[in-house]
């Protein structure tokens, strides 16, 4: 316990009360005298300015000031919202968005202040507007959404859940692009829009997006450059989870990207073009993932420099290679907690990130901070189709169901632990047990 994180539990050598008493008394008189003098000066100054409205309570609250963004006002000065030609939908391109957004932030300085302004995130997700065909589909959708709400609450992110088609042509995987465009316009205070497919589970509730890593980029997806350019593979990246910066470059990309889908004039043509370029393409028609691979290959000079393909952690993790290892990952984390006293300390959920950063430090020192030993950040149930139930023939529904239960309960355990409970069996969502004090070393 030589590290600085643990110093708060280390006490200085004790002195006797006999030796401490004179010093304490002297310090006490000095403190009271100084505080009284300061209050007297403030009282006299404020009374001189406005002798009719000053009270002792107002002095105590004098320096309180607003905390966080000001949600109670909107200045009357015109902004882009007052432009009748601005459209949230695809069609007419948004122009000069960076300066329009910058002007809005100038009028709302509380949103532009502080270190978090450049890293403000809006998580966007959604599902179809109708009832799921799968009898357990709506239950699963609720649990998937709860998982995302839990993560956003812990990390201080905003979240928006959509259940309507903003463009009737944009169905399936194309449905998110009108929503991403509208979200940028509706949330100029957000620097990043984070799309997460409805069937993706955030399975490391402590992991913090490394946004500083992406300071020179505008789009982040999971993938590998060599698979894009050497293999021209459909699986070279995944567009089901992505981070996109709220800027003009991104709006231009969305216009181009969506034009290759059903929102564009000729999606059938684009499907054939994509298939001729990407030999392992899974869908006969145009799909958004193939469209992005196409843009990276054919319009590399325009887009590639601002796109980050993330492979250091699971921004998208294929569920079939993850779920069977979750029990072992849990045991590995508990071993670290057994070794480090402070990680077992009960604490408020609001300070979970402090302990998460401490745990990350020890995982790295132990060499456990690698895939298959660390918690996967995102476990994506591609092909399981929990709402429709029409899963890929490669899997059985039982495998999908058990995998989803494991991943959801694995994530939920990280949340429930702050409330004093845990799922002892990852395959039993209904059963929870109270945690003993000093878990897991009890």
Image: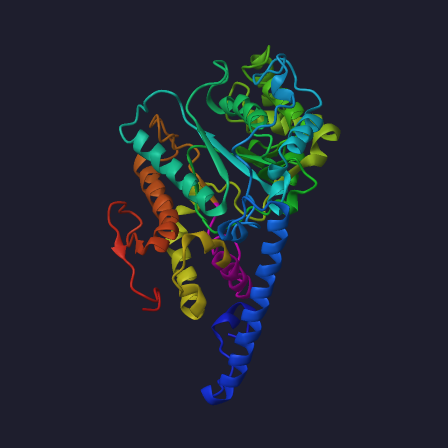
**Residue segment shown in magenta:** 355-377
Provide residue 206's location: percent of width, then percent of height: 47, 51
Closer to the camera, 57 or 327?
A: 57
Q: Is residue 388 visible?
A: yes
Coordinates of residue 151 in the picture (x, y in percent): 45, 44
Label tally:
0
Q: Say which quadrant the C terminus sits in.
A: bottom left
- Viewed as shown, does residue 179 lie left or right of 138? right
Residue 291 lies in magenta, yes or no? no
Res. 279 in view: no
Q: Tell me what residue is drawn at x 31 percent, y 56 percent.
A: 420
At horizontal 40% and vertical 64% (from top left) the residue drawn is 345
Q: Residue at x 56, y 13 (%)?
A: 268
Residue 167: percent from left, percent from top: 50, 15
Q: Residue at x 45, y 86 (%)?
A: 17
Task: Say which of 65 and 13 sits in front.
Answer: 65
Q: Nearer the viewer, residue 239 or 130?
A: 130
Where in the figure is residue 355, as x and y percent of width and height?
48, 59
Above/below status of 170 relative to 203 = above
User: Residue 357: within the magenta?
Assistant: yes
């Amino acid at each position: 316990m030589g590290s600085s994180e643990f110093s708060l539990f280390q006490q200085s050598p004790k002195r006797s009360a006999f030796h401490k008493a004179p010093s304490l008394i002297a310090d006490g008189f000095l403190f009271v005298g100084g505080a009284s003098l300061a209050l007297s000066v403030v009282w006299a100054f404020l009374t001189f300015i406005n002798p009719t409205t000053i009270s002792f309570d107002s002095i105590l609250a004098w320096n309180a000031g607003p905390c966080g963004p000001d949600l109670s006002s909107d200045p009357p000065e015109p902004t882009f919202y007052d432009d009748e030609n601005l459209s949230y939908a695809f069609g007419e391109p948004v122009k000069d968005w960076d300066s329009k957004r910058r002007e809005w932030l100038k009028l709302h300085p509380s949103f532009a202040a502080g270190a978090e302004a450049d890293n403000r995130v809006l998580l966007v997700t959604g599902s179809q507007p109708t009832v799921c065909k799968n009898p357990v589909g709506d239950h699963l959708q609720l649990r998937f959404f709860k998982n995302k709400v839990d993560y956003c609450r812990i990390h201080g992110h905003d979240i928006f859940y959509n259940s309507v088609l903003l463009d009737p042509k944009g169905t399936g995987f194309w449905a998110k692009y009108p929503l991403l465009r509208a979200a940028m316009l509706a949330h100029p205070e957000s620097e990043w829009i984070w799309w997460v497919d409805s069937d993706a589970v955030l399975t490391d509730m402590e992991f913090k997006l490394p946004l500083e890593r992406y300071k020179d980029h505008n789009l982040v997806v999971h993938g590998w450059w060599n698979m894009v350019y050497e293999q021209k593979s459909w699986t070279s990246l995944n567009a089901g989870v992505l981070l996109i910066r709220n800027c003009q470059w991104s709006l231009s990309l969305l216009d181009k990207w969506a034009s290759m889908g059903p929102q564009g004039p000729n999606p059938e043509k684009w499907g054939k073009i994509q298939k001729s370029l990407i030999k392992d393409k899974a869908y006969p028609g145009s799909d958004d993932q193939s469209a992005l691979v196409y843009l990276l290959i054919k319009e590399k000079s325009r887009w590639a420099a601002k796109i980050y393909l993330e492979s250091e952690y699971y921004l998208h993790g294929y569920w079939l290679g993850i779920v069977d290892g979750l029990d072992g990952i849990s045991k590995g984390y508990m071993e670290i907690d057994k070794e480090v006293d402070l990680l077992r300390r009960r604490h408020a959920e609001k300070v979970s990130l402090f302990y998460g950063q401490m745990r990350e430090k020890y995982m790295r020192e132990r060499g456990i901070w690698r895939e298959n030993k660390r918690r996967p950040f995102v476990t994506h149930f591609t092909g399981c189709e929990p709402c429709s139930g029409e899963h890929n023939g490669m899997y059985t529904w039982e495998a999908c169901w058990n995998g989803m239960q494991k991943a959801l309960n694995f994530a939920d355990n990280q949340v429930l632990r702050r409330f004093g409970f845990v799922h002892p069996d990852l395959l039993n969502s209904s059963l929870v047990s109270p945690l003993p004090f000093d878990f897991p070393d009890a």
